[in-house]
Image: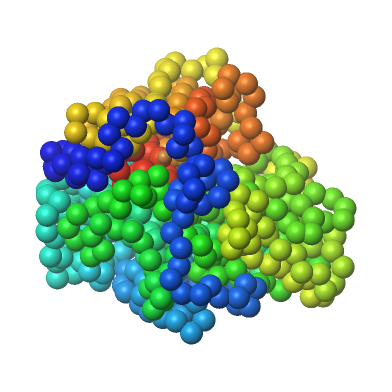
């Protein structure tokens, strides 16, 4: 397997041979997707739809179909569907239950969930619950493939046995849900093919609630809105456009050379709709922003900014509520990050259109969506000054220190992306970590990389030896690093022994081997 991967990367990475002087590649290439972007822009071949014409869809909430061994059973069928994303066009998607985003799972802390996935797609899949504190055998290790019912015709690279726990048809994922209220998401994690499969639609929300959160009185019900932001490009017939070497995803992984840095598109979708509009009452709303894009970062701002008060009051980060709210004039959100915020539309006169703009975009990608304040209404929600009992991790208590370097790599024939100068090998553990022990992990980057850990969240201790940044508060499971940065995080893994992942969540980097496995003992 390792041989064939090196063969593949050798082939697609030739143009990058010896590209160690990476400074010039830091997002300023002529076709890059805008300032501060590492990814290359892929443009659509249809004329872009008018912005702010489509209503914001809210993904449906999945109902459990029964109880199995004390867990709520949820059954999801992964299948193809044709959706009207761009008005007047049909876009074939890979969808959880044939939808994009997939249905939202809503579960409670302490109440286990059993999620049964059935694969009726033409490709193997792997489901990962991002942010889940999940046992290894349910976490979605990239080689634990779920082959389609009836089997897939894998060829070439994709047919190699990579040693995972391969099933056919259905797989049960057991999620203990022993973790606090948080906005998680589930998505594909198939070895070498995660980026094209998420691009085709395999992503959905999984929201955990708990009693502590309910007691706070934050906006709820229709005033608690999940917002999944992605960018996509379209072919002239409405299909998603993606620069895969093998569009069938059955043979050779990888993207065309020009897209090694990541793929970004010129259409912004929120919950699967292009630049949508949501009518809101002039009251507080809780907005759960998720950046589910392959490689694009956003800096979200409200336009106009509220005449008084902060634009966003951040109440939660990736893995749960903050200790106390933080006022944020803007939100810089990297792939896989979540920002849980409250916006008070009472600051605006009724009739105002409030745009969410992206100051890291240009042209079509500088717009995201719009809120239209349509009426006054009563509001009994509050944002309390204390949100959660928050355990601050103290670096002085750490018993272990490790370093992880994320860089463009040339190791032997491998010329993709590396962690500590190695390409991902699913059968090699790059660290052994004792459960229950606090460690400090230092991440180093060459270019822009959002770094994600499985199994447990972490706290950002410092950036380049100084204080954490504006967006680093709380329990994080993904932290964005700018070019040539280092960030220290404190992490303590717990409960589950097995193999877990650390990787870049730029999905093209991930697929091109910027991932490592660690074993917990
Ligand atoms: Cu959201 Cu290992 O991924
Ligand atoms: Cu994850
Ligand atoms: Cu990366």
Query: How far from the left and from the top, in percent, is residue 22?
Result: 42, 31
Name the colouring of the figure: rainbow
Residue sitting at x 71%, y 68%: 371
Q: Quadrant of residue 290?
A: bottom right
| Residue 515 appears left or right of 377 | left
Quadrant of the drawing holding the N terminus = top left
Q: Is residue 256 visible?
A: yes
Which quadrant holds the C terminus? top left
The image shows residue 117, relative to residue 292, as above or below, that is below
> Which residue lies at the image location 26% right of the left edge and 63% below the top edge?
247
Q: Nearer the viewer, residue 512 or 260?
A: 260
Q: Is residue 126 left or right of residue 475?
A: left
265 vs 340, left or right, is left
Q: What is the x, y in percent for residue 279? A: 71, 74
Q: Which one is nearer the viewer's eye here, 65 or 48?
A: 48
Which of the two residues, 509 or 221, is positioned nearer the viewer here?
509
Q: Is residue 55 visible?
A: no
Residue reaching furthest to the front: 30
Depicted 289 relative to depicted 93: above or below:
above
Q: Residue at x 70, y 47 (%)?
A: 330
């Amino acid at each position: 397997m390792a041989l064939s991967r090196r063969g593949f990367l050798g082939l697609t990475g030739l143009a990058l041979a010896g590209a160690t002087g990476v400074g010039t590649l830091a997002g300023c290439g002529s076709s890059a997707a805008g300032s501060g972007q590492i990814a290359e822009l892929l443009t659509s071949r249809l004329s872009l739809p008018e912005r702010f014409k489509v209503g914001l869809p809210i993904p449906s909430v999945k109902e459990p179909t029964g109880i199995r061994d004390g867990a709520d059973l949820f059954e999801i069928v992964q299948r193809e569907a044709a959706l009207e994303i761009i008005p007047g066009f049909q876009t074939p998607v890979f969808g959880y239950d044939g939808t994009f985003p997939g249905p939202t799972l809503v579960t409670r802390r302490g109440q286990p969930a059993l999620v049964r996935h059935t694969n009726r797609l033409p490709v193997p899949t792997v489901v990962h619950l991002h942010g889940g504190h999940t046992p290894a055998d349910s976490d979605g290790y990239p080689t634990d493939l779920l082959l389609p019912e009836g089997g897939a015709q894998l060829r070439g690279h994709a047919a190699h046995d990579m040693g995972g726990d391969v099933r056919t048809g259905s797989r049960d994922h057991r999620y203990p849900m022993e973790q606090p209220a948080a906005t998680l998401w589930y998505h594909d994690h198939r070895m070498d093919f995660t980026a094209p499969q998420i691009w085709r639609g395999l992503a959905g929300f999984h929201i955990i609630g708990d009693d502590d959160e309910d007691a706070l009185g934050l906006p709820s019900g229709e005033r608690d809105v999940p917002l999944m932001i992605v960018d996509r490009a379209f072919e002239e017939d409405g299909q998603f456009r993606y620069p895969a070497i093998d569009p069938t995803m059955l043979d050779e992984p990888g993207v065309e050379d020009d897209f090694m840095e990541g793929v970004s598109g010129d259409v912004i979708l929120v919950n699967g709709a292009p630049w949508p509009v949501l009518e809101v009452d002039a009251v507080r709303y809780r907005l759960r922003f998720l950046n589910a894009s392959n490689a694009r970062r956003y800096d979200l701002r409200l336009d106009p900014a509220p005449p008084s008060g902060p634009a966003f009051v951040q109440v939660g980060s990736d893995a749960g509520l903050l200790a106390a709210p933080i006022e944020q004039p803007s939100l810089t959100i990297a792939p896989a990050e979540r920002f849980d915020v409250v916006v008070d539309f009472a600051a605006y006169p009724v009739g105002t259109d409030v745009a969410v703009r992206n100051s890291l975009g240009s042209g079509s990608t500088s717009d995201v969506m719009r809120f239209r304040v349509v009426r006054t209404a009563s509001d009994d929600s509050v944002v309390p000054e204390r949100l959660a009992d928050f355990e601050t991790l103290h670096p002085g208590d750490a018993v272990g220190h490790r370093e992880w370097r994320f860089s463009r790599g040339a190791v032997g024939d491998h010329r993709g992306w590396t962690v500590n100068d190695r390409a991902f090998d699913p059968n090699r553990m790059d660290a052994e970590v004792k459960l229950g022990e606090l460690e400090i992990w230092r991440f180093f980057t060459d270019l822009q990389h959002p770094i994600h850990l499985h199994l447990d969240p972490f706290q950002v201790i410092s950036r380049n030896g100084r204080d954490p940044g504006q967006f680093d508060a709380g329990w994080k499971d993904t932290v964005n690093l700018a070019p040539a940065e280092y960030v220290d995080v404190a992490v303590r893994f717990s409960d589950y022994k097995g193999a877990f992942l650390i990787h870049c969540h730029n999905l093209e980097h991930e697929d091109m081997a910027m991932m490592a496995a660690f074993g917990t003992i």
